[in-house]
Image (tube, grey):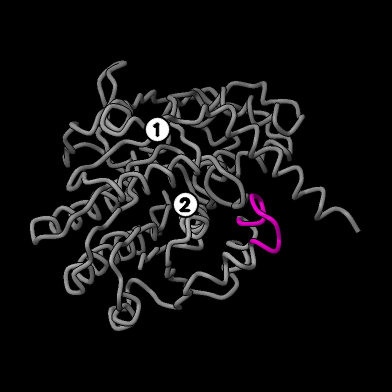
Amino acid sequence: MILVTGGTGLVGSHLLLDLAKSGKKVRAIYRSEDKLSEVKKIFLYFVSAKETAFLFDSIDWVQADILDIPSLNEVFTNIDYVYHCAAIVSFDAKNAENLRATNIEGTANIVNSCIIFKVKKLCHISSIATMDIALGDEYISENFTWHPEKAHSDYAISKHGAEIEVWRGTQEGLSAVIVNPGVIIGPGFWDSGSGQLFKKIDEGLKYHFPKTTGFVGVQDVSKASILLMDSSMENEQYIVVSENLSFKTILEWVAESLQKKGPHTPLEPWMVFIGWIYQSIANILWGAKKQLSKNDYRSLFEHSYYSNEKIREKTGFSFTPVKSVVMETGVLFRKEKDNIASP
């Protein structure tokens, strides 16, 4: 049987759909009942209501918390493979303690349970945030070494700490792979992560910023994770990025997908410095009301390029163009908005 943690999140819900459609026996962890409706909504984007009900009910849902070790004993019974998607994503300094608890301690609990229950393989969903910054236009690869003396966000530190727990597990005999996705684009969670890009453009966002980074569709993250899990490859990590793009380009595509006017005013450093429109920026990138830190401010103007050569060469994986993902996501956003607006 397969276990998915974080099954009510963006990656986890799409992963559950792919696994359930393939006929695999799946168990998923959830913390609150209200989150389950989000999973059903994701399923309905891609399959009929009848199939959604069938696939959702085929999953063994267990209420548990990765920080509650006793609750994991029931969860891990008869589990052979684990996809660890559960994590907190936040760049607010106020959440530093929660980040470290969930992302590091929670991962340690999952790794320990995998070892105790003799799980055959673990797939850990990490982030490109754990990859160090390159110089100039150099492409960042899996070979880049983490430099603790450099400035890192609390989120990046917590995800790096989680990876250390996974590597520790491999030293104790656990077979594992780590997936490092870029900014994940996909439907369903319009109030968090990249989903806010669609909501903010729909509301008339006027500003764009020059930051460049790696982007990938959520379905590609799911498919790549399954591919790596089902392969003989182990104890390695893989950057999962389709393309390196500027947020200006992404925002223009989002506007096109929503048939809206795109942001036309470039964000200048002095605007951020004096605090102009910081709330819109924070909402888009972090999904929380917060003051921009020095690292946050600097990151808005950074250009980072990530190499997907390793996963392409080792597995033959083919990525979906990001513009196609954005357009499809925009269609679903508009459809959902129209349905809500209908009496």
Decide whether residue 48 is among the magenta residues: yes
Q: Is residue 232 above or below residue 297?
A: below
Magenta range is 43-51
Can you say whether 58 is above or below 280 in the image?
below
Residue 86 sits in quarter:
bottom left
SS category of the residue bearing label 2: helix
Q: Decide if residue 30 is on the left or right side of residue 113.
A: right
Q: Residue at x 21, y 36 (%)?
A: 150
* Residue at the farthest top position: 137
**Three-letter amino acid code of the residue under disc 2:** Val
Q: Kindly identify the amino acid type of the residue bearing the numbered disc 1.
A: Val
**Crowding near pointer 2: few (<14 within 10 Å), some, many (20+)?**
many
**Between disc 2 and disc 1, whose residue precedes?**
2
Residue 319 rendering spot, x and y as whole percentages: 45, 30
Quarter of the image where the N terminus is located: bottom left
What numbered label is drawn on residue 11?
2
**Image-based side of 2 in relation to 12, left or right:** left
Left or right side of 41 for 127: left
Q: Looking at the image, which residue is at 32% across and 48% down?
A: 126
State the residue position of label 1: 241
Q: How many marks?
A: 2
Secondary structure mostly seen in the magenta stretch: helix
Secondary structure found at label 1: loop
- Where is residue 125 shown, x and y percent of the image? 34, 50
Closer to the camera, 319 or 298?
A: 319
Q: Which image quadrant is residue 107 in?
A: bottom left
From the viewer's side, name the closer residue of 88 and 243: 243
How many C-alpha atoms fall within 10 Å of the one at disc 1: few (<14), some, or many (≥20)?
many
The single residue placed furthest to the front in the displayed view is 23
